[in-house]
Image (cartoon, rainbow, N blue to C red):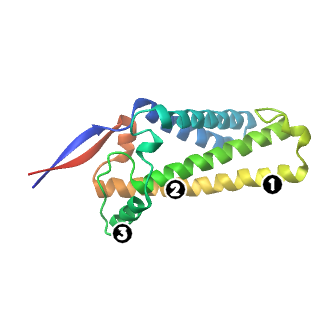
Amino acid sequence: METNNQNIMVWDLALRCFHWLLVAAFFTAWWSEGRDIRIHLVAGSLVFGLLLFRFIWGFVGHKHARFSGFWPSVEAIRGHFRLLLQFKAAQDVGHTPMGSVMIFILLLMLLILTLSGMVLAGVQMNTCLFSFASASMGFETEIYTQQIHDLTMHILLVLIGIHLAGVAVESILLRSNLVVAMFTGKKKIKEMTQ
């Protein structure tokens, strides 16, 4: 039995642009916090806009971009975890089951981060979508919202570290550079032939 490597187009241009714009906007917002509130607000708003795009693209986009295309089952997650414990990787064309879980968690945490940030901008500066909240929100609620925003940011930094470690491990196990694949859209898949 022989193994042939085949490059398959997996991630479309829209999804790849979303991914790298999200990376740039997120880290710009992270860097500018406490340095320049204007840059922070613009970058955070861009993250929110990108999340809206991703939500829509998750239903109408290419098959590997659709949420239904990478919604993992519990059994698939267990199977993937068992393979990783054996230092093996499955040949998933799109996201792996555990990678899919991470994507959904990252998207949810980014949504919480941006919504709490917009509430804070509405309360503290009377800007963004939640400017109406400035009159009705008490000081305790503002502090609570700030804590949610800060905690979510710290959780996201940990999750991003785990995500990057997962990409590195899968790249090594698959002998395929997944970072390059997210630039080109093409993923190397091993095909078994007789």
Q: Horizontal and vertical percent for residue 130?
A: 79, 36
The residue labelled by disc 3 is: 85
The local crowd at label 2, few if under 14, some if 14 to 19, many if 20 or more residues have their Cα within 10 Å, is few
Give the amino acid type for the residue marked by disc 2 in the picture: Gly
Residue 28 appears left or right of 175 = right
Q: Residue, x 41% and y 53% (percent of image)?
A: 167
How far is disc 3 from disc 1 in space, using C-alphas? 40 Å
SS category of the residue bearing label 3:
helix
Query: How far is the residue under mark 2 from the one under mark 3?
Result: 19 Å
Which of marks 2 and 1 precedes in the sequence?
Answer: 1
Is 17 left, or right, of 116 in this rendering?
left
Residue assigned mark 1? 144
Q: Nearer the viewer, mark 2 or mark 3?
A: 3
The quarter of the image holding the N terminus is bottom left
Viewer-closest of 40 and 120 = 120
> Residue 161, which numbered label?
2
Viewed as shown, does residue 3 lie left or right of 184? left
Which is closer to the viewer, label 1 or label 2? 1
The one nearer the camera, 131 or 22, is: 131
At numbered mark 2, what does the secondary structure look like: helix, strand or loop?
A: helix
Question: Contact (CB < 8 A) between labels 2 and 3?
Answer: no
